[in-house]
Image: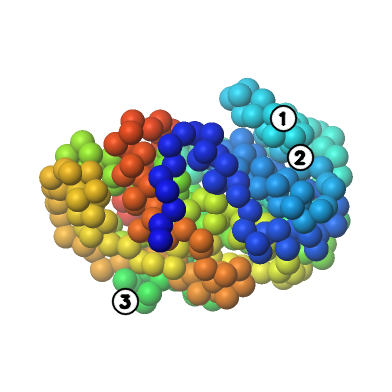
């Protein structure tokens, strides 16, 4: 039986931060405070709130600290209202990073993707230099760091999705800089014996953004859908949050690498047609599916963390109901269809 629709932003935030049993158990085993660097992004607030809720459910008293520039002041206000300490910091400034409190557990969520074209230097600084500063500051901590499935490059559909041991062939400045971030983590993990996990995410989605929402909105507007990038993965952001917290159980000084992805390989054409039925709209498809796409194999994450609690089918039903009800969207398209690596 499916879950009932989500009707309000407050209910959505509650669902996104609902900890899994595995996340509760992992934070019950973890000692010390936890800091989320880059908490102001799309995933950060719900992950920080889940960490607090999981800790409370596990009977652990710890501070959850969220760090960001907080260009949107309301984000810091929300964190504080939930009981999370919000600290403003520009993580590209060494003196500001040095002034952050010492904590034994760090989730690194910083990254720059969109707007890379024309600002390549800022993407490289954010993805690599910032990472080095954080590793130097938190060399005595455990670090769970987010990366991206884009580091693999395009994978043949017949391959079933890239695995963690596949050769990396990133395309474009963003993807190459993302690999640079991983190499910085690996260097400091080995050189300073920092226990780490690196999570290659592909792609987190909820009701206000994500690949599934992008497709649903096009179907709702009866806009043509190009199926050249014909396949993708999607994972409920709440499941990605829970798996990231569980990753503290698996950190190692030669960083543990895990794909965070939905286990299903979804076909754009089939997803669009399903949204057409859910939304009562005519679906217009153009192009022909290429033989490859950005795809990740989720077998290792399922083995380590268990399967996602929310299926792609459930997500599509929630998103369709959200759109029909006029639910708010973040207005941040994923551009998942980009094949040349230029973002």
- Chain-order first, disc 2 or disc 1: 2
Residue 314 higher or lower than 160, as above or below:
above
Q: Which mark, by number, is residue 65?
A: 2
Residues at marks 3 and 1, CA–CA distance in whole angstroms: 47 Å
Q: Residue furthest top?
A: 73
Q: Residue at x 66, y 64 (%)?
A: 22
Provide the secondary structure element on which disc 1 rests.
helix
Q: Quadrant of the N terminus?
A: bottom left
Provide the secondary structure element on which disc 2 rests.
strand
Asked if residue 41 can be seen in this view, the reply is: yes
Label 1 sits on residue: 80
Q: Residue at x 38, y 32 (%)?
A: 327
The percent position of residue 120, horizontal first and vertical second, equals: 50, 41
Q: Mark 2 or 3, which is nearer the eye?
A: 2
Residue 320 higher or lower than 257, as above or below:
above
- Chain-order first, disc 3 or disc 1: 1
The one of 248 and 226 positioned closer to us in this rendering: 248
The one of 86 and 282 positioned closer to us in this rendering: 282
Toward which corner of the image does residue 311 lie, by quadrant? bottom left
Q: Residues within 10 Å of mark 2 (few under 14, many from 20)?
A: many
Relative horizontal placement of residue 212, taking residue 248 as reference (left or right) = left
Label 3 sits on residue: 158
């Amino acid at each position: 039986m499916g879950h009932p629709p989500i009707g309000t932003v407050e209910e959505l935030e509650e669902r996104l931060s609902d900890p899994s049993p595995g996340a509760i158990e992992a934070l019950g085993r973890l000692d010390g405070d936890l800091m989320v660097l880059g908490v102001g992004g799309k995933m950060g607030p719900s992950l920080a709130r889940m960490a607090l809720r999981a800790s409370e459910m596990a009977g652990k008293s710890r501070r959850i600290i969220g760090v960001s520039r907080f260009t949107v002041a309301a984000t810091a206000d929300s964190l504080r209202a939930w009981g999370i300490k919000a600290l403003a910091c520009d993580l590209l400034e060494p003196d500001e990073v040095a002034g952050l409190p010492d904590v034994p557990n760090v989730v690194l969520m910083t990254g720059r993707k969109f707007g890379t074209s024309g600002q390549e230097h800022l993407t490289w600084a954010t993805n690599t230099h910032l990472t080095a500063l954080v590793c130097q500051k938190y060399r005595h901590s455990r670090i769970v760091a987010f990366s991206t499935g884009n580091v693999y490059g395009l994978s043949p559909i017949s391959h079933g999705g890239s695995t963690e041991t596949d050769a990396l062939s990133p395309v474009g400045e963003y993807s190459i800089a993302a690999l640079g971030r991983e190499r910085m983590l690996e260097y400091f993990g080995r050189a300073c014996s920092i226990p780490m996990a690196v999570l290659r995410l592909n792609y987190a989605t909820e009701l206000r953004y994500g690949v599934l929402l992008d497709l649903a909105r096009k179907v709702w507007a009866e806009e043509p859908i190009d199926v050249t990038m014909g396949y993708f993965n999607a994972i409920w952001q709440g499941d990605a949050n829970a798996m990231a917290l569980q990753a503290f159980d698996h950190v190692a000084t030669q960083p543990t690498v895990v794909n965070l992805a939905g286990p299903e390989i979804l076909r754009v054409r089939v997803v669009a047609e399903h949204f057409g039925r859910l939304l009562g709209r005519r679906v217009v498809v153009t192009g022909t599916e290429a033989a490859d796409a950005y795809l990740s194999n989720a077998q290792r994450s399922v083995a380590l963390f268990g399967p996602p609690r929310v299926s792609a089918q459930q997500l599509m039903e929630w998103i369709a109901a959200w759109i029909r009800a006029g639910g708010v969207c973040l207005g941040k398209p994923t551009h998942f269809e980009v094949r040349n690596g230029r973002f």
